[in-house]
Amino acid sequence: MQRNRPPSMQAVNVLRALAAEPARWRYGYDLGTEVHLKSGSLYPILVRLADRGLLETSWEPGVGSRPPRHLYRLSLAGRQYVAELTAASPDRTVARPHNRWSEA
Amino acid sequence: MPIVFVPMLGLLGVVIAMMRRHTTVDRPAEDVAERLLRWGVGLLSARRAEWGQAMLGELDHIEGRARRLRFALGCVIGALLLPPWGAAAAGVGAMLALAGGAVAVFASAVGRYGLGDGGQVGVGILLVFLIGCLVAASALVRRPGVALPGLLGGAFIALVWLSLSGFTLYDQIAPDIVPWHPLIVEVVVPFAVGAAGALWARDAAVGRRVARLAGVSAGLGLFLYSTVAVAVLGAGGPPDDSGTVSAIVSDRLGNNVVMLILLIAVTATVGWGGAAAAGPIVARLRPTTDDVSGPSTSRTVVVARGLRLGVLSAIAAVAIVLAFTSWLRGH
């Protein structure tokens, strides 16, 4: 059963970064750099957001011998979720990153 | 005891020679980060395989060795923790219980028999070593096809050790002086487990992992039991001329730690040889690209099923014979 716990601050930061340009597809590494998250924190967050249907994913075909690259953007449900999140707690802005053991 | 290492080293030499003979260099070179990440994404469940490809695809676009390595390391940690764990969670839980129980009993024996600061340091070192074992085991059980044969192999190794040494607490402390026992427990059984793992999964790499997991799980189980034996019997049991009660208990606990390390290292090493030795049979069992949809595929599946059944039957037969022999010796 999928549990919908409140998102962590890092997850909120990811959601807000994606919501800044909701139509644009984003790369994982660029997204992590923007919200100051290491890959070990970013990917579990992206997986959870995708599991909850808040994230759309796509593949950019690889060029030559390069492998395809995964792309992310907010789904419609994700955009609505961010809007609700903003309305519920407008002061919860993109904060400085903090380490959390569970998302190391 | 040193004579045991002669066949082991000989076996190792043969295996290395075989591996070098079968090594191919047709793949493009990978850096450390990519190799690490490829290993890490292998820990993901089939449901998360797409995310592993996403990480690999992203790594390909990252420049700079340090940056790539940081990214790969983070992804590996993420992959290690990312659910679902499925049946692997039960295996890790069981090994966690064994390791936790062993540390608790070890620490209580250190306190009860007054082993002092040296004993406390020993508990700390043991704790770090067991955490390392658990991390390694948690990675192994998540590899496809490793958990069940690995844990079965561990149970088999533990059963053979107990059958040869004896099942009672007293037997765990008494030295095993039968000269051929080390050959069985340190060469034949680990070799058989590695080979059986490779044949089970029809993959030599899986066989090597099975041997490692079997070594860790058997080591943890036997270590817990032998530590319980020391905690219960203390300086009692077989005669010991080490001196004071503390010295005897300290000596026995130390022996158990050596046994733990030896069992894991020997099973992993010799089991690796067994898996490599089974490689040619495994290669014959594997369907080729030409006959994937042909009638020989079903024949291969039947042969593989028969082989699995044969491996299981052989393990069960050996276990029964050993247990019976041990029982006869006790009476």
Image (cartoon, grey):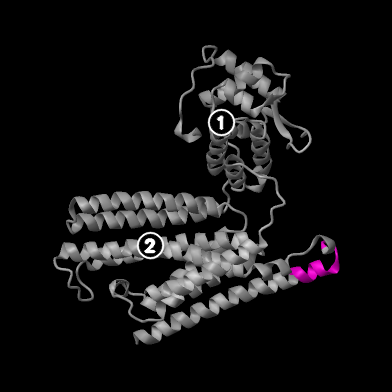
* B65 to B161, vertically: above or below: above
Front residue of A56 and B65: B65
- In the image, taking residue B130 as reference, residue B228 lies left or right, namely left
- Where disc 1 sits, the SS reads helix
Q: Name the residue under label 1.
A: B67
Q: Position of residue B230 (x, y in %)?
A: 26, 65
Secondary structure under tag 2 reads helix
**Separation (CA) of disc 1 from disc 2:** 38 Å
Left or right: B69, with B168 as reference point? right
Q: Specify whether residue B197 is in view.
A: no
**In the image, residue B192 lies in the stretch drawn in magenta:** no
- Residue A27: image x %, image y %? 67, 27
Q: Which residue is drawn at 50% across and 33% down?
A: A103
Residue depth check, mark 1 versus mark 2: number of the one nearer the observer = 1
Range drawn in magenta? B292-301
Q: Residue at horizontal 55%, vertical 12%? A: A90
Q: Mark 2 lies on which chain?
A: B
The overriding secondary structure of the stretch rendered in magenta is helix
Residue A82 vs B61, above or below: the answer is above
Query: Can I make out residue B277 in this image?
Result: yes
Q: How many marks?
A: 2
Asked which quadrant contains residue A72, the reply is top right
Badge 2: few (under 14), some or many (20 or more) residues near its Cα, within 10 Å? many
At x 28% / y 62%, what residue is drawn?
A: B254
Disc on res. B260:
2
Please name the amino acid that badge 2 sits on.
Leu
- Chain of residue at mark 1: B
Would residue B86 be found to the left or right of residue A99 on screen? right
Residue B175 placement (x, y as % from top left): 30, 75
Query: Above or below — where is B281 with respect to A30?
Result: below
Quarter containing the N terminus of chain A = top right
